[in-house]
Amino acid sequence: MTTTPPVERRSDRSEPIVRIVGLRKSFGDLEVLKSVSLDIYPGQVVVILGRSGSGKSTMLRCINHLEKPSSGAVIVKGEVVGYRVKGDRLHELRPKEIARQRAATGMVFQAFNLFPHLTVLENLLEAPCRVLGRPAGEVREEAMKLLTSVGLAEKADVYPSTLSGGQQQRVAIARALVMKPSVMLFDEPTSALDPELVGEVLEVMKELARSGMTMIVVTHEIGFARAVADEVVFMAEGRVAEQGPPSQVIDNPQTEATKTFLRSLN
Ligand code: ADP
Ligand code: MG
């Protein structure tokens, strides 16, 4: 794996692209998110750390409207996710509108979730054509550019099952990007990979960060967080326990919970 220079970017702090405001989420009696508030600015890379069960995935899923908040709100590019503001009332969006809204946030999961019956290129064409109704001919060129950028142009016509896990995850990233999202959400994108395949996926993510993409990344890859994150958020028991630049949260943690967690990774 070649090493690339550290990522140097400036984010625009004028207006958050994602606002999480007093977000709570319960499953039955279990309160998983206990009033989380977080602002993410254009071009920022925010890495979310925390033990298993601390609510990281649930928070990402609320941003993408895969889960509905119990209270509080997520606002992406000024729009309340899942709702439309009419006068002083909130109206739930219809599934089609939610699909349109969801296109603003690209999500990459731990399990690659590619469509097994479609080729790599067809995987990329699926959402732009079906959700946005764009003609395949027009999307194909953009899709091929993205496959080139993740180093997989020559795999356009093969089926996902013939690819390694690292290659499949790079396709999943390209598939999210083809929707031209304003923010990319990554939920432990390298956790299911064999160790020797982790680097190639992190490289693609670093390149994406370098290009200025706004990213929220749940990961245990501390090296990635140190090199790429503008901000590290440590979650514990459904709350933001600590938040700040990597030099603080990773190298000089303030809370016992953060210290214990970081020790557990070594
Ligand atoms: P993390 O990603 O930090 O490991 P999660 O957000 O996946 O945490 O889960 C937080 C808690 O919520 C866990 O206790 C989990 O079991 C619970 N949980 C998550 N999704 C559901 C669900 N759909 N139904 C019931 N409990 C859930
Ligand atoms: Mg999770």
Image (cartoon, rainbow, N blue to C red):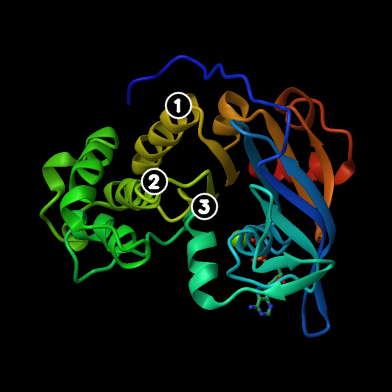
Residue 176 at what x, y percent from top left? 40, 51
Disc 2 CB within 8 Å of nearest ligand 2 atom: no
Going from N to C along the chain, the mark reached first, 1 or 2, is 2
Q: Amino acid at mark 1?
A: Ser
- Whether residue 49 appears in this view of the structure is yes
Going from N to C along the chain, the mark reached first, 3 or 2, is 3
Q: Classify residue 91 as left or right of residue 98.
A: right
Q: Residue reaching furthest bottom?
A: 28
Q: Ligand 2 quadrant? A: bottom right
Q: Amino acid at mark 2?
A: Leu
Spatial distance from mark 1 to mark 2, Cα to Cα? 12 Å
- Residue that numbered label 3 is attached to: 104
Local SS, label 2: helix
Local SS, label 1: loop
Disc 1 CB within 8 Å of nearest ligand 2 atom: no
Residue 143 at what x, y percent from top left? 24, 46
Going from N to C along the chain, the mark reached first, 1 or 3, is 3
Q: Nearer the viewer, residue 79 or 176?
A: 79
Asked whether the beta carbons under mark 1 and mark 3 sit within 8 Å of each other, the answer is no
